[in-house]
Amino acid sequence: MALSAVRDLRDVRPPATAEELEQFETDVLAGFVLARASAGLADGTIRGAKDAALRIPPSGPEVKTLFAGWGGEPATCRKFAPTARNHTASKLMSQVGLRVSEACKLDLADIKWDLGRFGKLHVRHGKGARGSGPRERMVPLANGADRTLRWFIEDVRGQFDDDHTRPGAPLFPSERRCADGSSGRVGDDALRGGLKAAAMAHLPTWGDKLTPHVLRHFCAFELYLGGLDLIAIQEVLGHSWIATTMRCVSSDFRTRTLRRHLDATVAAALQAQNGGRA
């Protein structure tokens, strides 16, 4: 009888250094090229359509600015509950990497407060690989997601309807009412529209470029910077293939590495112009 060692995904490594980030980028790109060659895929297949361009997410300070400004809207806007709902759903996407379709299909009962240190979300309608059907997963309420949800449930959710115990009660309700008077389930168009409007108002440099999927990319990169390894990030985001996780993280590494080199080059040039003075 053979024994295998299983590592607890809750164990995290220390935050990556700048040198480790650059080495990671090199390793990921080398692995990607090798996997592409072994699969017999051409450059055109990998490149895909024009709409399949890499989705490089905003930086941490930019996302913080977005949600800080957006978070002040419910106190002054005409429709408090829908605005707070859209804010909460988008923030959850940025914190734990939910797809917009997964957020729409969450029920109140899918929040498992008693599991893990912060609680977990039971994502029952995750995206399956190649039409295999929904792929379930449990997502830890990390990065402050537990506080985000507690505020929404305690201060906002009851303004849609007050029946929290009925089977199938949606976490994020719609303003529309069902035949029995209860709230329906929010649609992805409402959440996408809310995010777009908030980006235009509070992060105009991103405008309509900031989509729910871009927030997933942001989450993946922030989780890696926080010390989570690729296998754990794959589990959190619900990717069927580790290559998807690698591509999601490495695209941002490549962009930020280039920016880092550019900043260093500009700083060196300025220093040279000033006769070596910083």
Image (tube, rainbow, N blue to C red):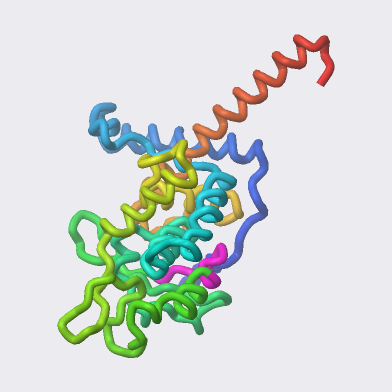
- Give the answer, above or below, for where 111 lies relative to 36: below
Q: Quadrant of the C terminus?
A: top right
When asked about the image quadrant of residue 43, the answer is: top left
Residue at 35% x, 38% y is 35
Q: Is residue 199 magenta?
A: no
Residue span colored magenta:
138-147
Q: Quadrant of the N terminus?
A: bottom left
- Give the answer, above or below, for where 147 lies relative to 209: below
Residue at 34% x, 65% y is 103
| Residue extending farthest left | 179
Q: Is residue 41 visible?
A: no
Image coordinates for residue 252, horizontal then vertical, percent: 49, 39
Image coordinates for residue 228, horizontal then vertical, percent: 56, 56
Judging depth in this view, the residue of 18 and 8 nearest the camera is 18
Q: Is residue 135 visible?
A: yes
Image coordinates for residue 190, horizontal then vertical, percent: 29, 59
Residue 222 shown left or right of residue 201 in the figure: right
- Give the answer, above or below, for where 18 lies relative to 90: above
Image coordinates for residue 36, horizontal then vertical, percent: 32, 35
Residue 36 shown left or right of residue 115 in the figure: left
Q: Is residue 142 magenta?
A: yes
Residue at 42% x, 58% y is 90
When asked about the image quadrant of residue 98, the answer is: bottom left
